[in-house]
Amino acid sequence: MSVQKIKEDVFSLRANDWDRTLFDELIPLPDGTSYNAYVVKGKNKIVLIDTVDPRKTKELIDDLKSLDLHRIDYIVSQHSEQDHSGSIPEILKMYPMAEVVTNKKGKEFLTELVKVPEDKFLVIEDMGTIDIGGKTLKFIFTPWVHWPETFSTYLEEDKILFTCDFFGSHIATNDLFATNEGKVMEAAKRYYSEIMVPFRTSIRSNLQKIKDFDFEIIAPSHGCIYQNPKMITDAYSDWSSDDVKNTVVIPYLSMHGSIQKFVDRFVRKLQEKGIDARPFDVVTADIGNMAMALIDAATIVIASPTMLSGVHPKIAYVAYLANVLRPKAKFASVIGSYDWGGREVDVLSGLLGNLKVEMIPPVLIKGDGREEDLKGIDDLAERISQKHRSINL
């Protein structure tokens, strides 16, 4: 961890987690992640904005000591999840005079989750302010990105918007700012795909809420700081919109080669029609890459053999994940292979109940299939092409 200056009397205290390979024990992290805390020094008060994951508490304490802070007056807790709030109890031991600044819901969570004493809170309201001497903090409630209590903090004089999980990215790096835009945006999209996709409506509302603030810097609590805020706000506007791309995502699993053959043919037929086809073998694929592809896809087609009259557990897992994330796809279908029968389509349809999609009739083929059976795959590609054209893709 290291202390880096953002502006005069404003510092980043970043704990890089280079070795973290999974986030929420779900999505692979090829570039690790970071937990970012911030210190703002006013003439009268000193503020710590967010803390870090409990596993990095010692690094945060060392950095606070390196700043030679004899006091912290306020600990602003923008989000109560433990990777941002988990170090608060130890910081309160160091700075017992500090008050924990949060909203009513945040107080409820922090009391329960990290056992902050009731008498340590300063509860703020939406658009409330704190003057710390030459610097003013304004609190902007941005709920459901991705918890109900989350808020952002606007440092008026320095035009910095601290956003916690909002606009974050999973990347461990020594770069303070998002200078490698391609790399950072890929990490930001992976981050968005894991936790933000189900909250598109709230994200759109919160983007509208912050748009009239004159901020030059966005400082999230994961990943790099944006000196070009429009880069990430435009991306969030795109990702959270109802617009989809001419893309079909195809999670598949092949036990004996039949499904692999069907998927290969299906991908070729879609590509011939100018459709971006993205197959993912669920046994070996990076689920994070698949989740990123799901953000924009117009159609999802799950391809699976029948197993014990249902579906393979890995396919069930992917269907469950898609159902939880609720991507904005418009259409869905199934390609199945069976030997003697089963309820594969019924099982998958049940697992996808949260998706607001039009179900296109499935293609079910016995064994390897005959040529006339395989033409059903061609017909499915054509139906999808027609559906995509119907919404002007």
Image: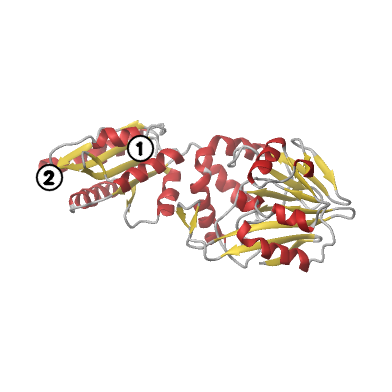
Q: Is residue 306 above or below residue 178?
A: above
Amino acid of disc 2:
Gly
Q: Residue at x 61, y 50 (%)?
A: 82
**Above or below for 150 versus 254:** above
Decide which of 1, 108 is in the foreground and name it: 108
- Of labels 2 and 1, earlier in sequence is 2
Query: Is residue 58 rendered to the left or right of residue 330?
Result: right
- Colour mapping used in the image: secondary structure
Asked which secondary structure carries label 2, the reply is loop
Q: Residue 136 in the image: x percent, y percent?
A: 83, 47
> Quarter of the image containing the N terminus?
bottom right
Counting from the top left corner in percent of width and height, residue 169 is at 57, 55
State whether residue 327 appears in this view. Answer: no
- Identify which amino acid the numbered label 1 is placed on: His
Where does the image place residue 191, in percent across and percent down from the top left? Answer: 52, 51
Within 10 Å of the Cα at label 2, are there few (<14), some (14-19), or many (20+) other Cα atoms?
Answer: some
Q: Residue at x 67, y 43 (%)?
A: 110
Disc 2 from disc 1: Cα separation: 27 Å
Q: Position of residue 282 (x, y in %)?
A: 33, 52
- Which circle, 2 or 1, is nearer the viewer? 2
- Residue 335 appears in the picture as rendered: yes
In this rendering, the count of numbered labels is: 2
Residue 388 is tagged as 1
Residue at 13% in and 45% down: 367
What residue would you read off at disc 2? 369
